[in-house]
Amino acid sequence: MNPLSDAPIGTHTTSTHHAQHNPRAARYIRLIAIVSTFGGLLFGYDTGVINGALIYMMRDLGLTPLTEGLVTSSLLLGAAVGAVLGGRLSDRNGRRKNIMFLAFLFLVGALACALAPNIPAMVLSRFMLGLAVGGASVSVPTYLAEMSPAKQRGRMVTQNELMIVSGQLLAYASNAIIGNLWGEQHGVWRWMLALAALPAIALWLGMLIVPESPRWLASQGRFREALRVLRTVRHEHEADVEFKGIRHVAERHATAGRGGWGDLSTPWIRRIFLIGVGLAVVQQATGVNSIMYYGTQILAVSGFGKETALLANIANGVISIAATLLGIRLLGKIGRRPMLLTGLSGTTLSLLFIGLLSSLLGVSELRAYLVLAAMTLFLAFMQGFVAPVTWVMLSEIFPMRIRGFAIGFAGSVLWMVNFAIGLGFPSLVAYTGISTTFFVFFSFGLFAIAFVKWFLPETRGRSLEAIEAELRTMHEGV
């Protein structure tokens, strides 16, 4: 498939100069981004905290490689279910209400994990927490994409990615502090898990003061409310122009009823749907979460002590934030496809390096430092290029009619692949070794590069309505 042209589509693109005319709108947009991305912070903390907590849970709960994988991956299985439910519920009840419900679920899940008395209770609690993580992974980017002006959309959606990696760094840092100060105490991992309750409360309170998505309001026929919201986050003239496009698309979809599986009988919708699902697989095929969940263990096996591995793992969080900040800048200047291809090339080579280092060098501090360097290189490409583009494009490419449903399903597929990696990684390492495991991820990376090169469209610089119109025109003839 030929990629879309990278040039903006004249009348469909909304100018971002409204901030010069309406500073109040610009401040309100920033507030919306800060508040809603607390969902990303929770996403990051709850997926990253297990990285350091597992070492102490293994001691206190007697985890085996199998139960270690179950505790880690139960959250991911919950996230797969939560992504589907989150997409559907955000279509039915609204993006804002759904995020508020997820904040409550984050709070309950975090406390349940911290208080879990045994392995079965921990697995169940992690599954519950995963429902919130999966729901947030699709609901927050969708909300941000629908609230933001076209030329700011990449930057705003990627702020969620910044909060995800910030949450992971917060988890790594708090794990290192708690582990080095109180690591000998029984149940120290409970405090690591319980800290996630604080941002959950902040997210719920913050969502009380932000508006509903104007595009969701329009999809419900609430056009007057949609226009009113647009005029609070745009210059008035730009709001009116954008509203006309939103209303046109909403009225066209309204005659067909609620979006869902039946829409996939339309060839162009089905093709875009499958491309989005493929993109979700590509993001996880890099093996990123083998590093995010088991980085401390990888470093410990390579040659670091337990406490040193906890401290060294903070470097992964720091480089993730720095790379994401770079990605935010690049999204406004570089097309989505070249960014993704660059990122996948870098991550694939980094996986090869980790495999070679683990194969050629014996266990030592030298090997541990070199593996750490390869891991940080991997995360620089992953968080700076691959992850931001993935979530931005998943929030962009699906038509309004099936957006919540489609991003929910794609997110579910993403989390199912994540689940398979999280569950299988400890056992795979135990039976084949670190080097063979990372050679497998290297081969996955090669397939991911080929998929992006041949199938992914370009979407930078267009309004959501313009992307839908052009993809429809392109694929109706395919």
Image (spheres, helix red, strand yellow):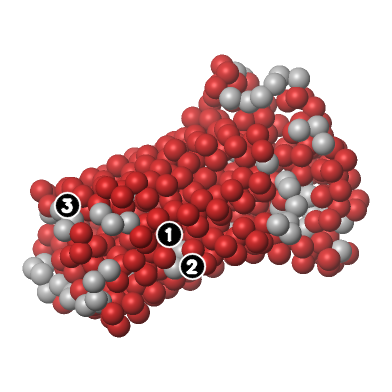
Spatial CA distance of label 1 from label 2 is 21 Å
Q: Is residue 56 above or below residue 266?
A: below
Q: Which residue is mark 3?
A: 65
Q: Residue at x 75, y 52 (%)?
A: 211
Pointer 1 residue: 111
Separation of marks 3 and 2 at Cα, in angstroms: 28 Å
Rendering quarter of residue 289: bottom left
Can residue 45 be seen in this snapshot?
yes
Amino acid bearing label 3: Pro
| Residue type of the residue flagged with mark 1 | Leu
One can see residue 328 in this view: no
Amino acid, disc 2: Ser
N-terminal of the pair, mark 1 or mark 3, is 3
Q: Are discs 1 and 3 less than 8 Å apart at CB?
A: no
Dot 3 falls on a residue whose secondary structure is helix
Above-or-below relation of 105 to 370: above
Q: Earlier in the sequence, mark 1 or mark 2?
A: 1
- Residue at the disc numbered 2: 166
Residue 85: image x %, image y %?
A: 52, 37
